[in-house]
Amino acid sequence: MLRDILFEAVSATRWRSRDWHLCLYGSGDDDAYLHELATFYGLNDRIAFRGQSEDIRGIWRTHHALMLPSRVEGTPLAMVEAMLCGRPVIGTAVAGIPEWVREGRDGFLADAPAVTCLDAALERAWQERGRWQSIGSNAREDALRLYDPRPDETLLSIVMEAVNRSAGTFVLPREETKIASVDCVAREASPSVGIDHNSCV
């Protein structure tokens, strides 16, 4: 995630006069660096480091939008969860994010992972904050349409349909229809659905 450019963007003078707070969830190797960066930009009174949390609904009961600045993503699970909870997404137009987030409908997208682009997306979101509830409703509606709770079954169905179309009716031998094999293929094809790749055998 691009928390460094986010911190730089919100350290601008106009953001200092606005009423906002940013809570960061999760943890990683860069935690100490991010604390130092928040101090460097004078944001300690605006940014709270919350660490790991399993209470997704609890987070979204008390927070208004998801901030997801990224250089590289698949389809982030945090984005899907926020949208399912009816929250707008402010993110970067990389990889799977623009497939889910439409500018002004589900959230706001920075054109590139750069401070000026993120700042522009944040400003659009801020100016539209009176619409966040309806944008969140759109996000939930679209997420319910796009979300696949069983990607392994969907992938198997797509593969089998393609095989049947190209080669006539085709039945896999019994020993090749192992769930673990399908599970591993699905996990590699859709890593952002929250499945642990390490459990593939």
Image (tube, grey):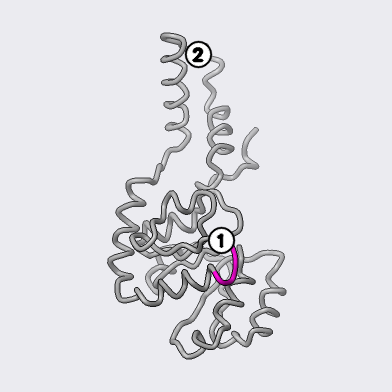
Can you give x and y, in whole percent of width and height, for residue 78 in the image? 49, 58
Q: Label 1 is placed on what type of residue?
A: Ala
Residue 83 position within the rendered picture, expressed as x and y whole percent measured from the top left? 39, 58
Q: Which mark is residue 112?
A: 1
Which numbered disc, 2 or 1, marks the residue closer to the eye? 1
Q: Which of the image's four quarters has the N terminus?
A: bottom right
Q: Is residue 116 left or right of residue 59?
A: right
Q: Is residue 192 above or below residue 93?
A: above
Residue toward you, 79 or 99: 99
Which of the numbered marks, if any, corresponds to residue 32?
none
Tell whether position 115 is magenta. Answer: yes
**Picture residue at 30% right of the left edge, 69% below the top:** 133
Q: Position of residue 18 (x, y in %)?
A: 45, 87
What main secondary structure does the magenta stretch of the protein show? loop
Q: Which residue in the rendered view is the most extreme toward the top?
A: 168
Query: Could you tell me which quadrant the C terminus lies in?
Result: top right
Query: Which residue is at a point 40% across and 42% down the rendered structure image?
Result: 148
Q: Residue at x 57, y 32 (%)?
A: 185
Residue indicated by mark 2? 172
Q: Residues within 10 Å of mark 1 (few under 14, many from 20)?
A: some
Q: Which residues are magenta?
A: 112-116
Q: Secondary structure at mark 2?
A: loop
Sequence-first disc among 2 and 1: 1
* Relative horizontal placement of residue 23, taking residue 33 as reference (left or right): left
